[in-house]
Image: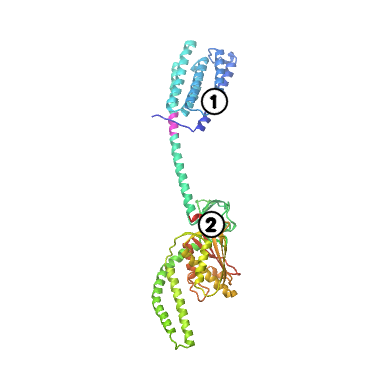
Amino acid sequence: MIFSPQYPSYRRQQILFYYGIYRLMLASALSVLALMPLETMLALPRLSADSFLYAALAYVIICIIGLVVTVSGQMGSIPTVVLLLTDILMQSLILHYLGGVETGFGNLMIVSVAIGSLLLRFQHSMLVAAMAASGAVYTEMFSVNTLGGDNLLQAALLGVAFFAVTLLLQYLISRVRSTEQLARAQADTILDLRHLNELIVQRMRTGIIVTTWEGSIRLMNHAAREQLGLEQPTFWLPRDMQKRMDTWQQEPGKRTEPLQMGKDRPLVQLNFAPLQDSPKCDLIIFVEDTVRVQQQAQHLKLASLGRLTASIAHEIRNPLGAISHAAQLLAENPALDEADQRLLSIVRNHSNRINTIINDIMDMSRQPTVQLEPVILRDFLDTCIAEYRQGQAKPNDIQVRGDPASWVRIDPKRMMQVVINLVDNGLRYSELRTGARKVTIRFGTLADTGQSYMDIRDYGPGIDKDQINHLFEPFYTTDASGSGLGLYIAKELSEANRARLFYTGDSNGGCFRILFAHTALQE
């Protein structure tokens, strides 16, 4: 089995730098040892003090040159082999002048062999080990001829130790590298899963906020920012949310009060849950749009009601048609007096009202289908106003103001129903209060979110606060002559066009705002 440990270039450079410091310290210590008086070194059977000194000083110079080369540039495999073989040669020479393996200096050569095992491939590291073993054996052979003694077995065992260290380190490093590769692959997988989870969280329509126990925000998705109006990056929960979190922390089983961060923001319900089963752990906050939840419940409730009312409306339409036809024929009778004509007018008016209610019910039971396309708001409103005025006998004042460059992606036919409905309501309520049929339409782009909007404002009495929450419910109306389905259908059609319809009026007049989807999300 051939092992091939590979280190990153910066790690190899770091190991070689520390090894260069070690070599320089070893060479300096040997030089100091060579300069000491001979009588203090009786334990070392040195062959020649001068030769030992020259070899130690030469080793110091070689170590300095090697350290400079290591620091100045990247060291590849071949320069590293040359560096280690030079070390082995110099250490073998010094070992010879000291007196052989009996002095114990040969054990220090294991450091060079170990460095070779760490940084080099199997073949090169075995070359370094073979060079070290040969140096130890030949040095001992020369020492035997010069100083006497018989330590060849010790030198041979030292050479075997060099090979054993090389093989052991090569095996251990190979296992470490395999573990590192597995850990890196698992880390990449975990990172991919993290990115996937973040993408899923950001795409969720339910608002998600992850906070610490104290209220420091760790994660917030786009839906939560939009529902709460937190367009700018923030690091702490808003004060109203913090109060509700404190209330939940004191009583985890208690449902917190709904929250609305602004007039143009939906009413949301905050649900808290701990991320770990430990005290004061991180929390996850689910921000749910109560209007959307109510709409889902309303859709479920109206699903069966719609089918029932549609069938009833269809059955009513036939006798209603007969009544209307009979009223028309009766109106052609010249013998009718003024009182009979007035009664006949009442029949026709109520027949028309019932027919309008039937049409609204039929529209409510149908699922609106839309085909979105880019539309310039100014041109769209001009078309809507012209269409509305064609069927009106009374004069009306409809003023349109806004940025001519504003555009949205909508279904013009479906959205025209919404605008005409709101304009007609506004003109009627303005006439009730001021005697003049007047409505102002403003449109443009919100500076904080970049979303296009349209405000349809009348000059009527406005709507009471206790009626606003029920304003878009089906069959709810503040006008005795209305069916209570106009605003409900208008809201349904707005949502089908990826827009939100809500009331923003006050005591000075009623105002309905249509907030279109962001242009970046409409492509």
Q: Earlier in the sequence, mark 1 or mark 2?
A: 1
What span is colored magenta in the figure? Answer: 169-176
Q: Is residue 469 magenta?
A: no
Q: What residue does disc 1 label?
A: 69
461 w.r.t. 523: above or below: below
296 w.r.t. 101: above or below: below
Element class at badge 1? helix
Q: Count the marks: how many?
A: 2
Q: Residues within 10 Å of mark 1 (few under 14, many from 20)?
A: some
Quadrant of residue 371 within the rendered picture: bottom left
Whether residue 226 can be seen here: yes
Q: Residues within 10 Å of mark 2 (few under 14, many from 20)?
A: some
Q: Position of residue 519 (x, y in %)?
A: 51, 56
Q: What residue does disc 2 label?
A: 226
On screen, residue 245 versus residue 145, left or right, reads right
Q: Position of residue 480 (x, y in %)?
A: 51, 76
- Which residue appears farthest toward the right when viewing the image? 508
Q: Residue at x 47, y 49 (%)?
A: 197
Q: Main secondary structure of the magenta part?
A: helix
**Front-most of 428 and 285?**
428
Q: Label 1 vs label 2: CA separation?
A: 59 Å
Amino acid type, mark 2? Glu
On screen, residue 352 versus residue 41, left or right, reads left
Whether residue 257 can be seen here: no
